[in-house]
Amino acid sequence: MERLFSSIELLSSFPFMGRVGRDADTFEWPVPRLPYIAVYEVDRAPERIIVAAVFHGAQDREAGKPPKR
């Protein structure tokens, strides 16, 4: 957990180092040396990040979503 939080904490200094996320206005940060992906948003006004979710890299993130039309 400590390594996960430390890695995500880097985003507060470098919020755009993640890749563009699957959902609009989100970014994804593959946590180095761990099998997790942090999904987050950047709130520019107060200059903060909002972590929306942390997924295991092997997790099926599309399960339970309605089909795209």
Image (spheres, rainbow, N blue to C red):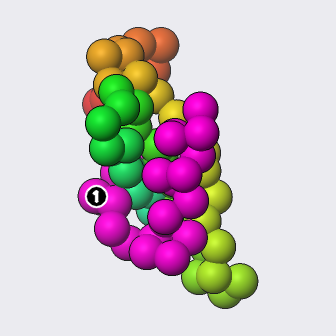
Q: Is residue 19 magenta?
A: yes
Q: Quadrant of residue 65?
A: top left
Whether 22 is drawn above or below 34: the answer is: below
Q: Which residue is painted at 37% across and 50% down in the image? A: 29
Q: Which residue is painted at 41% across and 23% down in the image? A: 56
Magenta residues, start to end: 1-24
Compare residues 12 and 1 and report the one nearer the observer: 1
Kindly give the residue lying farthest to the right in the view shown. Answer: 46
Relative to 52, is 31 on the left or the right?
Answer: left
Relative to 23, is 46 on the left or the right?
Answer: right
Compare residues 26 and 47 and report the one nearer the observer: 47
- The amino acid type found where label 1 is placed reads Arg
Compare residues 22 and 5 and report the one nearer the observer: 5
> In the rendered image, which residue does mark 1 sit on?
19
Whether 37 is drawn above or below 25: the answer is: above
Q: Position of residue 54 (x, y in %)?
A: 52, 34
